[in-house]
Image (cartoon, helix red, strand yellow):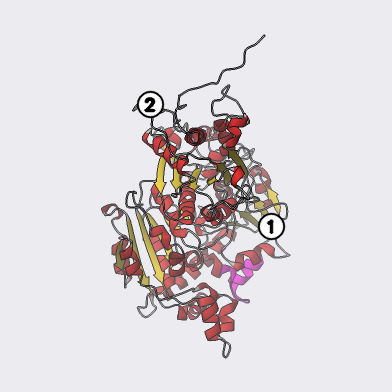
């Protein structure tokens, strides 16, 4: 006759409130793979807040407090994007939980491992009119990789255990949370990382009991098991810098002699580091012992590689081996001038009929798309041309497309090389020359614009000169950088971020704050005035909190500039339509940004010239905290500015 199994107990907190004990098990399930948690205050989530405070004191996690839940969620998203690991946000019940929705939606299509943790009323209070009670289970259905509901009342029923009966007890709260966290990462090439949702029904009491001794529950929190060497970006091995590239497909050559060390990373680690290009990319020689697949001559094709947001690094390597031209968006990771992308590619694709450049574009036979291109219609038109064969290169599952993608997906390097082929003689050089020609035209117009500082010139200047990590706001700013900037990789910390999952202006500044909190480098956020004002709660920090080292450059043109570059600009020039279009799409505003900065006690600088802007961005190590740098431009002349740029690029076009 066997005796019942006794609980497997590593620490004793049996004196405490059951809600606190459950919260500690939740945190223990999270902290082996998660280091940052952003918390918004609330009563129902109090057990989690107390447990997180204890875990932080034990060195297991870093807690960041925020007042606004939407800003908190995007801050956690920025942390996840920067560290390449799950980051969590904690809220109380009700509308507080609903405020996480925009960040969860962005994380879903961006493939970011955001952990949304929402406290809930106990099951028996639902449907009774209890205050701040709504149905939260499944509230993010279709947006999260997995979800878990823990109900405190199930502990008394024996369906949820605080003390596991073994290390792999599936009824233990800690084990269930740990399994949920795994779903946030890509566990194989066929799974895309993304957000997960943990909903917890807490019952009173929600505060800790008086401990029987000053020691309390003891050292109960688990520390992260991520090796310290893998927490740095880029990885360092021996005396060299090893680029973080994602797991190669079969037959893909190693990138460096240290490729074997990089191959030891898990699929999730490879995926999150896929965009870390380094000077090693400039070496086109194949490492000794590498497969011959990409060294052999392939049939020549007039191919272009289109690298969109979060493109796999291997795409650049293959394009360079084949000698094919690369059109790279700023957040592709391949826009660095050292890698030789085609500058001014948007204007190249818009070449007027009858020009040599138009003939060049029309002669394209094949297009390789890697990452997600979202910025320009000319790129989409190229990909969709009936006379062009297009494929998507994806090493792993991507969160933004399904089987409905209207082009074939290739995941093997050899298959891609065969499809793309070697570049015909002079093909890449023709694209390079076309790009340099239009880039010179862009520079000439922007720098000789009668001394007027335009938003395009300001965006170009900031993107080219700001040190360290850079976040580009959605809408006009990122497109201005894409059009005009020549980016250089001056140091390993320089990386370009943007929220391109859904490309909204939601949470851009908060995400930049999260990126800044994740590392030791000062971050620059380049945003338009509406993007900044839409997320002004990112400036609202409890006075107890460490403020992120963040420069926010606000290009203030008094409203929304992007719509004038679209069809709405044409409508607005029809008789009697200007006022309506300005009201409906321009959404003019007259907010005093300096007063807003002062109200939140952040440093403010106004820049009237590029010299003043450059001085404001220089010497980032000389300042801490948030600084807002405002410059004002006039958006009414932007449509004409773009027309002048096109005319300068093709002066002989009829």
Q: Which residues are magenta?
A: 348-364
In this orientation, does residue 466 appear? no
Q: Residue furthest front?
A: 128
Q: Is residue 48 above or below residue 12?
A: below
Q: Residues within 10 Å of mark 2 (few under 14, many from 20)?
A: few
Q: Which corner quadrant holds the N terminus?
A: top right
Q: Residue furthest left?
A: 622
**Where, by quadrant of the figure, is residue 328 drawn?**
bottom right
Query: Is residue 350 within the magenta segment?
Result: yes
Look at mark 2 in the image and give the residue it sits on: 212
Which of discs 2 and 1 lies nearer the camera? The answer is 2
Q: Residues within 10 Å of mark 1 (few under 14, many from 20)?
A: many
Work out whether residue 52 or residue 503 is closer to the camera in this orientation and state it: 52
Q: Is residue 647 above or below residue 130?
A: below
Give me the residue at 26% from left, 54% from top: 622
Image coordinates for residue 379, horizontal then vertical, percent = 61, 64
Q: Earlier in the sequence, mark 2 or mark 1?
A: 2
Image coordinates for residue 628, horizontal then vertical, percent = 34, 63
Look at mark 1 in the image and give the residue it sits on: 390
Image coordinates for residue 47, horizontal then vertical, percent = 46, 40
Work out whether residue 269 or residue 552 is closer to the camera in this orientation and state it: 552
Q: Measure how far apart labels 2 and 1 are at the Cα level.
A: 69 Å
């Amino acid at each position: 006759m066997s005796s019942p199994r006794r609980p497997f107990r590593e620490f004793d907190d049996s004196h405490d409130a059951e809600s606190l004990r459950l919260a500690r098990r939740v945190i223990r399930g999270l902290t082996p793979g998660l280091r940052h948690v952003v918390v918004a205050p609330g009563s129902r989530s109090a057990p989690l807040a107390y447990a997180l405070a204890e875990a932080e004191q034990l060195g297991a996690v870093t807690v960041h407090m925020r007042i606004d839940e939407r800003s908190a969620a995007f801050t956690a998203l920025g942390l996840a994007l920067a560290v390449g690991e799950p980051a969590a946000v904690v809220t109380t019940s009700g509308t507080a939980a609903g405020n996480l929705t925009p960040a969860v939606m962005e994380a879903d299509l961006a493939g970011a491992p955001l952990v949304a943790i929402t406290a809930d009323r106990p099951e028996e209070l639902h449907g009774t009119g209890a205050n701040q009670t709504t149905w939260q289970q499944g509230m993010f259905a279709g947006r999260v990789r997995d979800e878990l509901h823990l109900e405190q009342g199930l502990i008394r029923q024996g369906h949820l255990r605080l003390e596991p009966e073994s290390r792999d007890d599936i009824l233990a709260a800690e084990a269930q949370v740990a399994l949920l966290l795994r779903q946030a990462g890509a566990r194989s090439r066929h799974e895309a990382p993304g957000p997960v949702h943990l909903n917890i029904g807490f019952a009173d009491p929600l505060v800790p009991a008086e401990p029987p001794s000053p020691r309390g529950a003891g050292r109960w929190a688990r520390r992260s098991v991520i090796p310290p060497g893998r927490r740095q970006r880029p990885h360092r091995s021996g005396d060299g810098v090893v680029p973080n590239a994602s797991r190669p497909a079969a037959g893909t050559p190693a990138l460096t002699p240290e490729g074997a060390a990089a191959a030891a990373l898990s699929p999730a680690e490879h995926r999150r580091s896929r965009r870390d290009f380094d000077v090693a990319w400039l070496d086109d020689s194949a490492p000794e012992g590498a497969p011959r697949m990409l060294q052999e001559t392939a049939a020549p094709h007039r191919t272009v590689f289109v690298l969109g947001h979060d493109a796999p690094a291997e795409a650049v390597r293959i394009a360079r081996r084949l000698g094919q031209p690369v059109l790279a968006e700023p957040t592709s990771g391949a826009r660095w001038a050292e890698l030789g992308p085609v500058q001014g590619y948007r204007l190249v694709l818009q070449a007027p009929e009858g020009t040599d450049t138009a003939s060049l574009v029309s002669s394209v036979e094949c297009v390789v798309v890697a990452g997600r291109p979202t910025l320009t219609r000319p790129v989409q038109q190229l990909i969709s041309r009936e006379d062009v064969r297009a494929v998507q290169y994806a090493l792993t599952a991507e969160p933004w497309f399904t089987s409905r993608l209207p082009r074939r997906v290739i995941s093997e390097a050899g298959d891609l090389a065969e499809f793309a082929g070697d570049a015909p003689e002079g093909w890449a050089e023709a694209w390079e020359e076309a790009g340099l020609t239009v880039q010179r035209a862009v520079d000439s117009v922007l720098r000789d614009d009668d001394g007027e500082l335009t938003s395009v010139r300001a965006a170009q200047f900031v993107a080219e000169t700001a040190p360290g990590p850079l976040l580009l706001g959605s809408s006009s700013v990122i497109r201005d950088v894409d059009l005009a900037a020549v980016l250089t990789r001056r140091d390993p910390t320089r990386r370009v971020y943007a929220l391109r999952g859904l490309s909204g202006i939601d949470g851009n500044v908060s995400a930049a704050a999260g990126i800044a909190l994740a590392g030791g480098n000062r971050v620059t956020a380049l945003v338009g005035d509406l993007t900044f004002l839409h997320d002004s709660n990112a400036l609202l920090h409890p006075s107890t909190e460490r403020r992120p080292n963040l420069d926010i450059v606000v290009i203030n043109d008094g409203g929304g500039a992007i719509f004038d570059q679209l069809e709405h600009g044409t409508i607005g020039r029809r008789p009697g339509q200007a006022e309506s279009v300005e009201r409906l799409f321009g959404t003019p505003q007259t907010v005093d940004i300096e007063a807003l900065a002062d109200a939140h006690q952040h440093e403010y600088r106004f820049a009237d010239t590029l010299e003043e802007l450059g001085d404001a961005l220089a010497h980032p190590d000389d300042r801490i905290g948030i600084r807002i740098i405002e410059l004002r431009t006039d958006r009414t002349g932007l449509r004409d500015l773009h027309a002048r740029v096109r005319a300068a690029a093709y002066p002989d076009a009829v």
